[in-house]
Image (tube, helix red, strand yellow):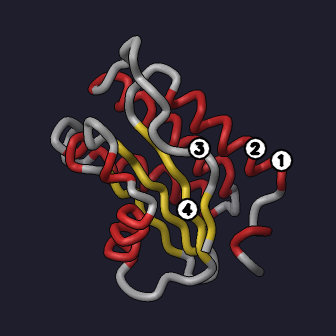
């Protein structure tokens, strides 16, 4: 199964809506990238995708990437320097654990939406929305 058809159109819309809602009250940016296979260490691959999507170019370095490789059955949450300096050290592990619980039940959309929502709460706390904030990155899901 290709990455593009893993989620239905309605599920993709749910994920994009979660990104939109999470970003409403923050200057932070969230992206989701889905691949069929992960070739290598999942964290290093997520870091490369993060760079390819130019997520490190946000003004406050406060982007978060949710990376999933569906056939390899791995995922990673990759946060930029600005957000990693602000959130508790176990923050990503807590979100990953909640997402994994959903993924084990094949509730992939729900897992992503929950992870995105929780990330948005942290982004809002550490990077509140300012009147001049612009959506620096697309809310579209990217695929490989």
Earlier residue among tags 3 and 2? 2
| Total labels drawn | 4
Q: Which mark is residue 1?
A: none
Residue 36 % position (x, y)? 63, 79
10 Å crowding of disc 3: few (<14), some (14-19), many (20+): some
Residues at marks 3 and 2 touching, judged by CB atoms closer than 8 Å: no
Q: Residues within 10 Å of mark 2 (few under 14, many from 20)?
A: some
Local secondary structure at mark 2: helix
Q: Relative to the observer, which residue lies in front, 104 or 73?
A: 73
Question: Residue 103 appears at what percent x and percent y?
Answer: 61, 61
Q: Give the quadrant of residue 21.
A: top right
Instruction: Give the label on residue 33, or none.
Output: 4
Q: Are marks 2 and 1 in contact (CB under 8 Å)?
A: yes
Residue displayed at 27% across by 26% down: 126
- Residue behind mark 2: 13
Left or right, 106 with reference to 84: right
Q: Would you name the residue on which mark 3 appears?
A: 139
Q: Could you say which disc has been placed on residue 10 in the image?
A: 1
Residue at 32% over, 75% down: 44
Q: CA distance from mark 2 to mark 1?
A: 5 Å
Name the secondary structure under disc 3: loop
């Amino acid at each position: 199964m290709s990455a593009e058809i893993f989620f239905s159109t309605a599920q993709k819309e749910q994920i994009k809506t979660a990104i939109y809602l999470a970003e409403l009250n923050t200057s932070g940016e969230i992206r989701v990238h889905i691949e069929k296979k992960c070739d290598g260490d999942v964290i290093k691959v997520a870091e490369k995708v993060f760079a390819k999507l130019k997520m490190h170019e946000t003004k406050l370095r406060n982007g978060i990437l949710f990376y999933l490789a569906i056939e390899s059955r791995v995922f990673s949450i990759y946060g930029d320097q600005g957000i990693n300096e602000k959130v508790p050290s176990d923050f990503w592990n807590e979100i990953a654990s909640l997402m994994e619980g959903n993924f084990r039940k094949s509730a992939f959309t729900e897992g992503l939406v929950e992870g995105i929502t929780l990330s948005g709460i942290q982004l809002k706390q550490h990077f509140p929305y300012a009147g001049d904030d612009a959506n620096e990155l697309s809310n579209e899901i990217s695929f490989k």
